[in-house]
Amino acid sequence: MRLGDAAWEYAELREEFFTPDLADMLNHAFLGLSVAAFAMVVWLVILLVRDPKGSVRKSLLKKG
């Protein structure tokens, strides 16, 4: 699917396909950083929910 989209876009843009605008590159960079940050948040939530050694549960249930 992505290959078909890339081929179609190249057919329309030709040499402009290989020289993106600065705004497009910045948008792609922000998208990549956002995806990486979201993935890290999801990973942290999964790690806290699973809690393999039970350390989070122990620290939450410990009375001061």
Image (tube, rainbow, N blue to C red):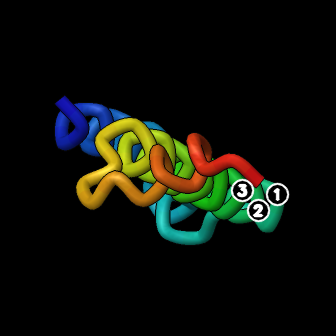
Residue 40 in the image: x percent, y percent?
A: 51, 56
Residue 17 in the image: x percent, y percent?
A: 49, 58
Q: Amino acid at mark 2?
A: Leu
Quote the CA–CA distance across marks 2 and 3: 6 Å
Question: What residue is rendered at 61% in x and 50% in y?
Answer: 62
Q: Please name which of the two marks, 2 or 1, marks the residue nearer to the observer.
A: 2
Q: Circle 1 sits on which residue?
A: 23
Q: Amino acid at mark 1?
A: Ala
Q: Earlier in the sequence, mark 3 or mark 1?
A: 1
Q: Please name which of the two marks, 3 or 1, marks the residue nearer to the observer.
A: 3
Q: Does 22 sit left or right of 20 as displayed?
A: right
Q: Quadrant location of the C terminus? A: bottom right
Q: Amino acid at mark 3?
A: Phe
Quote the CA–CA distance across marks 2 and 1: 5 Å
Q: Are marks 2 and 3 in contact (CB under 8 Å)?
A: yes
Question: What residue is rendered at 72% in x and 56% in y?
Answer: 30
* Element carrying mark 2: helix
Q: Circle 3 sits on which residue?
A: 30
Q: Does 20 sit left or right of 14 as displayed?
A: right
Q: Circle 2 sits on which residue?
A: 26
- Res 1 seen here: yes
Residue 58 in the image: x percent, y percent?
A: 48, 52
Question: What residue is rendered at 53% in x and 57% in y?
Answer: 36
Q: Quadrant location of the N terminus? A: top left
Q: Are marks 2 and 1 in contact (CB under 8 Å)?
A: yes
* Element carrying mark 1: helix
